[in-house]
Image: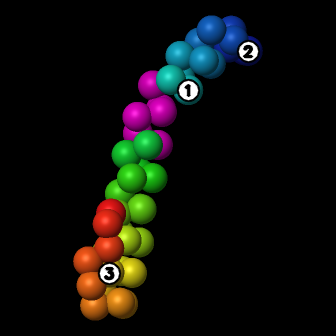
Amino acid sequence: MKHPVGAQMNTNLNMLPVLLKVVHIHAALECNKNAQKFSKMLPC
């Protein structure tokens, strides 16, 4: 059974905040690692 395009778009829009949150957390962790590496606070 194929989903209509509208339902697919809806699913993608619902997933977007989750994906953004994951990316943001990942970026923050990377920035933390870099800040520790250089022994100074980097603008995260």
Calculate the distance from the C-alpha at mark 2 to the C-alpha at mark 1. Answer: 16 Å
Q: Position of residue 17 (x, y in %)?
A: 40, 34
Q: Position of residue 42 (x, y in %)?
A: 32, 73
**Which residue is situated farthest in the right direction here?**
2
The quarter of the picture where the N terminus appears is top right
Give residue 3's quadrant in the image.
Answer: top right
Label 1 crowd (10 A; few <14 / some 14-19 / many >=20)? few
Residue that carries the numbered disc 2 in the rendered image: 2
Calculate the distance from the C-alpha at mark 2 to the C-alpha at mark 3. Answer: 48 Å
Residue that carries the numbered disc 3 in the rendered image: 35
The stretch of residues the image draws in magenta is 14-19
Residue that carries the numbered disc 1 in the rendered image: 12
Label 2 crowd (10 A; few <14 / some 14-19 / many >=20)? few
Calculate the distance from the C-alpha at mark 3 to the C-alpha at mark 1. Answer: 34 Å
1 with respect to 11 (left or right): right
Magenta span: predominant SS is helix
Taking the magenta stretch, the answer to whether it contains residue 17 is: yes
- Rendered view: 41 above or below 20: below
Question: What residue lies at 47% left-to-right and 32% top-to-bottom?
Answer: 15
- Rendered view: 34 above or below 29: below
What's the residue type where badge 3 is placed? Ala
Taking the magenta stretch, the answer to whether it contains residue 28 is: no
